[in-house]
Amino acid sequence: MDYQGEQEMELEALQAILMDDLIEYEGNLPSGWIAAGKTYKVIIAPDEEDGADSGDYPLKAELLFAHTPKYPEEPPSLKLRSVTGLSDTDLAEATAALNEQVQANLGMAMIYTLIGVAKEWLQGRVNSGPVVDPEVERRKVEDAAERKRAEARAHGTPVTVANFAAWKIRYDAEVAAIKAKAAEALRDDDKARRLSGKAWFMRQAAEGAAEDDEAGALSEDDEEDFDAEEVVAAGIDEEDEEDEDDIDYEDDDDEGMLDEL
């Protein structure tokens, strides 16, 4: 079979039938996507002429498809995604219907048939009753929860016997935990500061040795100071004796001069 020729003929037919509704897809492709050529997408929406207004029923999907190398003897690559209003459960149900038709149409061009199956499934979903957009519902739930929290913050929590008793239990437990932690820290501190008998004796011995060394150092300093003072005193005495000798010599000279006169 000329796979490429079959695929090109089908694309020409789809372009003629769908025209602008057949769009070449250039976005991110699903994981494991296989394509022998380009990937296309078609928007699937309810038919208004069948009595359903797509504006009243916000259900819309997009069908991605691509030919695989051996299509139509092997399945094409398909992916149905929600545009508005479809949940994951809805998509799983619709995808199962598409896969069933794929197996029934192997060997034949089937893309237009699959588009019709997707639209038929969507139309049946619309006809089953009013459709609620899951995203809209999620936002409503979140908004309601936020309003409730805002009211609680504005008015506070009413005090009752039950919630006060619950608060008292939590408070007492927290206080007890704090006290226990503080007592444990104090015990650890006392244990760290408490010395055994041997450790106390060794510390006293070390302090006594240090005091003896300090006393010995002071004695040596005193001896050095004493020796220095004696040397200085001796020097002063020698200078005084020399001065006295000089004075006596001058007096003798003066007496000799008077005798001569």
Image (spheres, grey):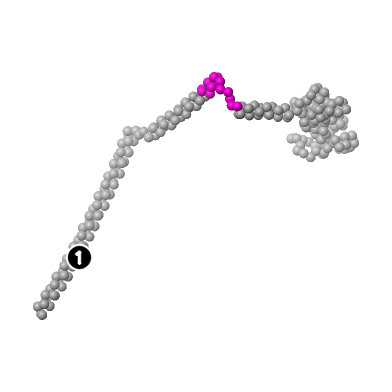
Question: Image check: 184 left or right of 219?
Answer: right
How many labels were placed on the picture?
Answer: 1
Residue under circle 1? 239
Secondary element under disc 1, as helix, strand or loop, is helix
The image shows residue 121 at horizontal and vertical percentages of 82, 26
The image shows residue 39 at horizontal and vertical percentages of 81, 37
Q: Nearer the viewer, residue 166 or 234?
A: 166
Q: Residue furthest bottom?
A: 261
Q: Quadrant of the C terminus?
A: bottom left
Q: Quadrant of the N terminus?
A: top right
Question: Which region of the structure is painted magenta?
Answer: 155-169
Question: Image check: 74 left or right of 142?
Answer: right
The stretch drawn in magenta includes residue 168 = yes
| Residue drawn at the location 63% of the way across and 27% of the way down | 151
Main secondary structure along the magenta-highlighted residues: helix
| Residue drawn at the location 16% of the way across and 67% of the way down | 244
Q: Nearer the viewer, residue 37 or 223?
A: 223
Residue 209 picture quarter:
top left
Other-residue count near label 1 (Cα within 10 Å), few / some / many at <14 / 14–19 / ≥20: few
The image shows residue 92 at horizontal and vertical percentages of 76, 27
The image shows residue 156 at horizontal and vertical percentages of 59, 26
The stretch drawn in magenta includes residue 123 = no
Q: Amino acid at mark 1?
A: Glu
| Residue drawn at the location 81% of the way across and 27% of the way down | 56
Query: Is residue 45 shown above or below 223?
Result: above
Q: Residue furthest top?
A: 161
